[in-house]
Amino acid sequence: MRSAGSGRHAPLVAAAGILLLCVAGRARAQEVQAENVTVAEGGQAEINCKLHQYDGSIVVIQNPSRQTLFFNGTRALKDERFQLVEFTQKQVRIVLSNARLEDEGGYFCQLYTEDTHHQIAILTVLVPPENPLVEVKEQAVEGGEVELTCSVPRSRPAATLRWYRDRREIKGISSKQEIGKVFSITNVVRFRVERKDHSSIVTCEATHPALRGQRKQTQYVLDVQYSPTARIHPPQGVMREGDTLVLTCAVNGNPLPTDIKWSRANDSLPERALIEGEVLTIPNLSLLDNGTYVCQVANKHGRSSDQYVLVVYDPGAIVEAQTSVPYAIVGGILALLVFLVICVLIVMVWCSIRQKGSYLTHEASGLDEHGEAREAFLNGGDGHKRKEEFFI
Ligand SMILES: *[C@@H]1O[C@H](CO)[C@@H](O)[C@H](O)[C@H]1NC(C)=O
Ligand SMILES: *[C@@H]1O[C@H](CO)[C@@H](O)[C@H](O)[C@H]1NC(C)=O
Ligand SMILES: *[C@@H]1O[C@H](CO)[C@@H](O)[C@H](O)[C@H]1NC(C)=O
Ligand SMILES: *[C@@H]1O[C@H](CO)[C@@H](O)[C@H](O)[C@H]1NC(C)=O
Ligand SMILES: *[C@@H]1O[C@H](CO)[C@@H](O)[C@H](O)[C@H]1NC(C)=O
């Protein structure tokens, strides 16, 4: 495109060259000033040439290949991305839109007077990074290591990549490759993973001067595979004849086991048993349904099972096995209480005999045993303090 343009406008370029030759060697104080410019790829760059004591001489602006873009305000190169936006006594201003890497280089501002002045504005084109790409080398499994690669295929200058996990940086190994004018960079991290790390997030962040403090981030959700666990949620209370048993097998694992096997140890499941995935239902229980029911799951990393021992009772049976222990404890506590009350009574009676006339004498013969006991403690010695909890 550019070479076509240059061919078309060759006469103008040549004219500029001739002019340059004509005016060379004659000295006069006149100046042009150009500033260096930085632009992000695809962005808009403004190239300024400041004129001092402009006397109407010809001003020529050339691109880095020294093709004339504008000849004293007239377009010479047919590249519409360049526009002359200002040409005054003070300055010449051109705007380049949709800047490309090839546009980089020195732009010449030349003033043809008796002496030739020129300044070069260096245009730098930066390539900011896109959001980093994150790839995992192979499927992570608990107890193993995961290797993650973060990459930015194009940036200029090279972007900086960092890994973060739980807001803390994790060190990776960076590498950089130069492809033409741009850099391809990667940062690789390796770390151990456990099942608790499944679904946790790691972030790769790219920073770059063209982003002006902003960051490009890509979050990666860890996928850690682990062996399954099975847990049967047992029903509440005892099961009696005619009841319906509902057992739920809570399954965990990655990949999640889909095939849940229900069985009965050393026996077959009752024919009435209904299996719907993780739920086993046995309606209208009979005594024959006694047994150990097992839920089994597996994935490629292992297997797990849980069991439930079903005991079916008569509808009328008083179930002692479940409650005999609590009864024993309650009985024991009651016996201890009665014993303590008796002890306290004895002590109080003894005290009232010793201290005749005390109001305790009358209280001790009162009706409320607990009231007495409390009084006894309030008035009694330190030795009884530890028993307070039984009365209050
Ligand atoms: C522009 O950049 C060039 C090369 O980087 C440097 O030599 C020159 O001094 C710069 N000019 C200005 C005005 O900053
Ligand atoms: C160059 O352009 C400027 C501004 O339009 C004009 O004043 C000047 O006369 C031109 N010079 C020549 C030699 O044509
Ligand atoms: C099943 O039978 C085996 C022997 O055949 C025995 O060792 C095991 O205890 C039995 N299990 C149950 C739950 O009855
Ligand atoms: C429950 O089972 C008993 C025998 O064990 C049977 O007589 C009764 O009809 C059954 N009830 C229902 C609702 O199926
Ligand atoms: C089931 O277990 C209960 C409680 O141990 C027992 O009374 C009943 O006889 C058992 N039934 C069978 C068929 O084993």
Image (cartoon, rainbow, N blue to C red):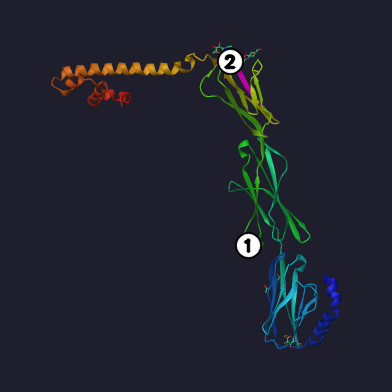
> Is ligand 4 closer than 8 angstroms to the Cβ of mark 2?
yes
Q: Is residue 316 left or right of residue 229?
A: left
Quickly name the residue at label 1: 212
Residue at 60% from the left image edge and 18% from the top image edge: 292
Q: Position of residue 60 (x, y in %)?
A: 76, 80
Q: Nearer the viewer, residue 108 or 81?
A: 81
Q: Nearer the viewer, residue 291 or 66?
A: 291
Q: Position of residue 145 (x, y in %)?
A: 68, 39
- For residue 152, which quarter of the picture? bottom right
Determine if the magenta segment contains residue 270.
no
Quickly name the residue at label 2: 286
Mark 2: few/some/many CA within 10 Å (<14, 14-19, 20+): some
Ligand 2 resides in the quarter of the picture at bottom right
> Is ligand 1 closer than 8 angstroms to the Cβ of mark 1?
no
Q: Is residue 178 left or right of residue 244?
A: right
Residue at 57% from the left image edge and 22% from the top image edge: 244
User: Which sits earlier in the primary sequence, circle 1 or circle 2?
Assistant: 1
* Nearer to us: label 1 or label 2: 2
Q: Is residue 302 left or right of residue 329?
A: right
Determine if the magenta segment contains residue 291.
yes
Q: Amino acid at mark 1?
A: Arg
> Element type at marker 2?
loop
Q: Nearer the viewer, residue 52 or 261?
A: 261
Q: Position of residue 206 (x, y in %)?
A: 66, 55
- For residue 306, which quarter of the picture? top right
First to last magenta residue range: 285-296
